[in-house]
Amino acid sequence: MAKGRKLNIPVVKGAVMGVLGLATAFAFALAGIGAQVAAAPMIHFLLGFDEQKTRGTALGFAMLAAVGGVIGFIVGGSHLDFGLALVLAVGATIGTILAAKPATEPRYAIVRRAGQSIGIVVAIYVFGEAMRHHVGGPQPWFPALTHVQPLLAGLVLGIVTGAISSLLQVANGILLVPALIYLPGLDPPRSIAVSLAVIALASFLPALSYASREAVDRRIGPWMAIAGLGGGLTAGLLLARMTFASPLPLIAFALVSMFLCAWRMWKMT
């Protein structure tokens, strides 16, 4: 009997993490934000993995959630600008590297706490606009971004959001999604799908690095991988069927953003 129970423990844990992972992947893919921010503490708390295995498993889960969201969005019949997503991912990587040193310095702790407050303010603003059905206004704030060298503008936007998110320790999607909506004037579902593509592209090499060091769990990890892909796919299909005026994507974005920023502020105290 004892032997049978031991054999069933990974299955039970995998099923539990699969259910939680499915819900997490769906919520974060619908919001356009990387799910590793929520997956890492959940994995560490429930499974007790060490730091490296926690990060590797969470990153792989988040990457597959983003990939599932992109696939669902395309399969649902919507167009995704991969060129824009690629330059944004490159820009975000450059911005993160540029801000890497100051982002880790203790003297910027107050700045990082302020950054979480800024994230909450951004989320509240987006939520209010969604409730009023004011999605980016009748015209983008900077219409030139859609006509004059859009890929160059995307590279600059990626660098700026990547640097700021790294310095303030705010998830990049919290800045990128509203920036795509209110600056060049992309509709919310497409902005979220582009953000998911950026997450997938930016996560690929780090996830591969963790996997090569065997820092990705091979017992519970596959359950979470399937859950991440399934949750992301469901969210992507739903995004593809939403109209420009639908407030649901922005509401999901705002709620997830506020939760993340409030949780980070609590962890910093």
Image (cartoon, helix red, strand yellow):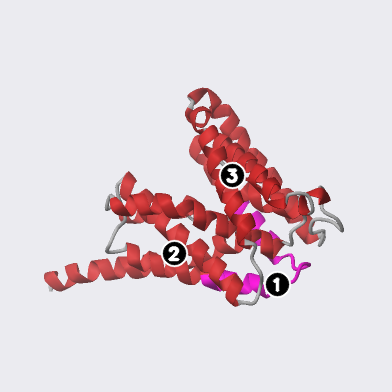
The amino acid marked with disc number 1 is Met
Which residue is drawn at the image coordinates 73% and 53% (left, top)? 126
Query: Where 120 sits versus 69, above or below?
Result: above
Residue 167 shows in the view: yes
Which residue is drawn at the image coordinates 66% and 53% (left, top)? 177
The amino acid marked with disc number 3 is Gly
Quick one: SS at disc 3? helix
In the rendered image, residue 161 lying in the magenta stretch gets the answer no
Q: Label 3 crowding class (10 Å Cα cut-off): few <14, some 14-19, many 20+?
A: many
Magenta-drawn segment: 233-258
Q: Earlier in the sequence, mark 3 or mark 2?
A: 2
Query: Where 133 sits versus 215, above or below?
Result: below
Residue 87 image offset from top left, x and y in percent: 60, 50
Alpha-carbon span between mark 3 and mark 2? 29 Å
Residue 103 image offset from top left, x and y in percent: 52, 31
Main SS of residues in magenta: helix
Q: Which mark is residue 198?
A: none
Which residue is drawn at the image coordinates 52% and 27% (left, top)? 102
Quick one: SS at disc 1? loop
Quick one: SS at disc 2? helix
Identify residue for label 1: 242
The amino acid marked with disc number 2 is Gly
Mark 3 or 2: in front is 3
In the rendered image, residue 234 lying in the magenta stretch gets the answer yes
Residue 80 image offset from top left, x and y in percent: 64, 65
Identify residue for label 3: 91
Which residue is drawn at the image coordinates 74% and 59% (left, top)? 186
Of residue 75 and residue 115, the one placed in the foreground of this image is: 75
Q: Are marks 1 and 3 in contact (CB under 8 Å)?
A: no
Identify residue for label 2: 21
Residue 42 shows in the view: no
Q: Label 1 crowding class (10 Å Cα cut-off): few <14, some 14-19, many 20+?
A: some
